[in-house]
Amino acid sequence: MTKYSKESIYLSAFAKLPTDMPSGGMYKAVDIGLVINPELEVVEDASITLLTDESVDFLKQIMVGYNLSEDGVDSLLETIKMRYFGTSQKAICVALKLVYEKYSIWKKENKVSK
């Protein structure tokens, strides 16, 4: 059963969570993984280490389908800042920036131009 395109790549990064929140006590960091189709530059799926299913589902709804070629990661970060007000917001944004940096490096190393 194929869920992702054959060209898809998976990149992840993490950022420290506030220690006074439940996820921070359990995980210490939020890890965000994105499945990206580099041909379309679209996020096909996302994984996020947070305690509640609702927060993970909500963030996935924002991330999946996002086109990285249009605005890079900035528009996605702005959407999260405008819509997600969980305690982990800052850590999520930091981790997403790191994933995007990895993606940019991967594109250069693999000579993907868009």
Image (cartoon, rainbow, N blue to C red):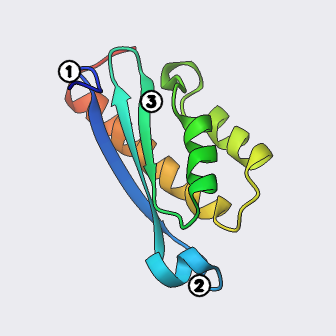
The residue nearer to you, when weighing 34 against 104, is: 34
- Badge 3: residue crowd in 10 Å (few <14, some 14–19, many ≥20): many
Rounded to the nearest angstrom, the CA distance separating label 3 from label 2 is 29 Å
Disc number at residue 64? none
Q: Which amino acid, by three-letter code, is at mark 1?
A: Lys
- Look at 35% across and 36% down and name the residue there: 35
What secondary structure is found at the residue carrying circle 1?
loop
Mark 2 and mark 1 in contact? Answer it, CB < 8 Å: no
Left or right of 12? Residue 89 is right
The residue nearer to you, when weighing 66 against 26, is: 26
Q: State the image coordinates of residue 96 (x, y, percent, origin top left).
A: 50, 48
Residue where numbered disc 3 is placed? 43
Q: Which amino acid, by three-letter code, is at mark 3?
A: Val
Rounded to the nearest angstrom, the CA distance separating label 2 from label 1 is 39 Å
- Look at 66% across and 33% down and name the residue there: 75
Disc number at residue 6? 1
Q: State the image coordinates of residue 26 (x, y, percent, origin top left).
A: 48, 81
Residue 87, compared with residue 63, is above or below; it is below
Residue lying farthest front?
1
The residue nearer to you, when weighing 65 against 109, is: 65
